[in-house]
Each structure stands twice: as structure tokens, then as C-alpha cells.
């Protein structure tokens, strides 16, 4: 009986440590989203960290569901459904990042350039800034930029950028 208690205590401690590590990782990626720039190499890291954030949330949901599997079957089903729902956007984002990294950046001359400022999901805290324009191929582009770049580019009518087209991230202004 004493050996079983030690084994159960060890398993419980490992679960608590794993849960703590997952929560810390999710918080770390949230901080990365706030701190990383929108353009340059950091922009792609920012995009990749968003995918990892979704996968982390999915992992936390799956962990919580599996932890409660013996006590409450509905918690298991709900947790696994939430895990799948969190991992779907993570897979979509990571697919775009991988495809862009495989293909490499494109050099695009944008004409009829405009800028857009949009509120994110959280309203006051989250603002997104975009550089919009038509490429030489006739395609309309909407590329994310930082607030500083947004104000610098407000009166530009034509610009050349190196960017990743799927993730809409600018690598550099030429």
C-alpha cells in the first residue's frame, strides 16, 4: 500500500509539473506576440509563435481532459473537443508559415498603396496596421506592418517590398 501511494504521488507531481510547464509556455508565447515586430525576420517568428500558442492551448485542454477522464466523461469529451478546436487554427497558421518558408520571399512592387488600421478582437489593446496595394500581377495585397511603419507609409503611393505572400509578412522594404 505504501509503494502505491508513493507511485501515485510521483505521478501526481509529474502531472502538476507538466501542467505548469504548458501554462508557462503558453504565457511565454503570449508575451512573444506582444513583443515581436510585425515585419522582418521577427514577423515570421511572430507568426510561427501564434501557431505554437494555439497548439499550446490545445495541449493544455487535452491535458486537462485526460486528467479528468476517470472522474467525468463529459469533461473528457469537452476538453478533447476544445483541444481539436484550438489545434485547427494552429495547423492552418503553421501550414502557411511552412509554405512561405519553403517558397521563400517574393519581391513585389505595390501601386495604389493605402494603409489600414483595424481593431483586433480585444478592441482597445489590439490594433493591426496594414499596407495595402496592387501588385504588378494585378493581385491585391494586404501586408501587416507596425504602428511606426504605418505612420511612415501613410502618404506613399508606390513601394517595393520583399514579403511572404501567404502569411502577409513583410521581410524588408526596398
Image (cartoon, helix red, strand yellow):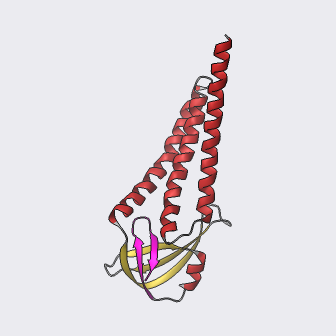
Q: Residue at x 54, y 32 (%)?
A: 77
Query: Residue 46, image x and y in percent?
Result: 53, 62
Q: Where's residue 169, x and y in %? A: 46, 69
Q: Nearer the viewer, residue 80 or 163?
A: 163
Can you give x and y, in whole percent of width and height, for residue 85 in the image?
51, 45
Q: Is residue 143 above or below residue 49?
A: below
Q: Quadrant of residue 148?
A: bottom right
Q: Please give the count of numbered marks on the rendered protein.
A: 0
The boundaries of the magenta stretch are: 158-174
Q: Position of residue 161 (x, y in %)?
A: 42, 79
Q: Nearer the viewer, residue 76 or 28?
A: 28
Magenta-drawn stretch contains 169? yes
**Above or below, 16 relative to 9:** below
The quarter in which the C terminus is drawn is bottom left
What residue lies at 57% left-to-right and 39% top-to-bottom? 61
Which residue of the protein is positioned furthest toward the left in this rendering? 137
Q: Quadrant of the N terminus?
A: top right
- Residue 33 image-quadrant placement: bottom right
Above or below, 75 against 32 in this view is above
Q: Is residue 92 magenta?
A: no
Q: Nearer the viewer, residue 127 or 98?
A: 98
The secondary structure making up most of the magenta span is strand
Residue at figure coordinates x 45%, y 56% from the top left: 93
Picture residue at 54% right of the left edge, 70% below the top: 38
Amino acid at each position: 500500500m505504501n509503494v502505491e501511494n508513493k507511485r501515485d504521488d510521483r505521478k501526481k507531481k509529474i502531472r502538476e509539473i507538466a501542467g505548469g510547464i504548458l501554462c508557462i509556455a503558453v504565457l511565454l508565447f503570449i508575451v512573444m506576440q506582444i513583443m515581436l515586430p510585425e515585419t522582418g525576420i521577427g514577423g515570421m517568428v511572430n507568426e510561427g509563435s501564434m501557431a505554437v500558442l494555439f497548439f499550446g492551448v490545445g495541449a493544455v485542454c487535452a491535458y486537462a481532459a485526460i486528467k479528468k477522464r476517470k472522474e467525468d466523461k463529459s469533461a473528457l469529451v469537452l476538453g478533447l473537443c476544445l483541444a481539436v478546436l484550438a489545434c485547427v487554427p494552429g495547423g492552418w497558421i503553421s501550414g502557411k508559415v511552412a509554405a512561405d518558408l519553403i517558397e521563400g520571399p517574393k519581391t513585389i512592387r505595390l501601386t495604389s498603396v493605402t494603409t489600414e488600421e483595424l481593431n483586433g478582437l480585444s478592441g482597445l489593446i489590439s490594433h493591426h496596421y496594414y499596407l495595402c496595394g496592387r501588385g504588378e500581377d494585378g493581385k491585391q495585397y494586404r501586408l501587416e506592418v507596425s504602428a511606426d511603419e504605418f505612420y511612415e507609409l501613410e502618404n506613399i503611393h508606390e513601394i517595393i517590398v520583399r514579403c511572404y505572400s501567404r502569411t502577409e509578412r513583410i521581410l524588408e522594404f526596398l
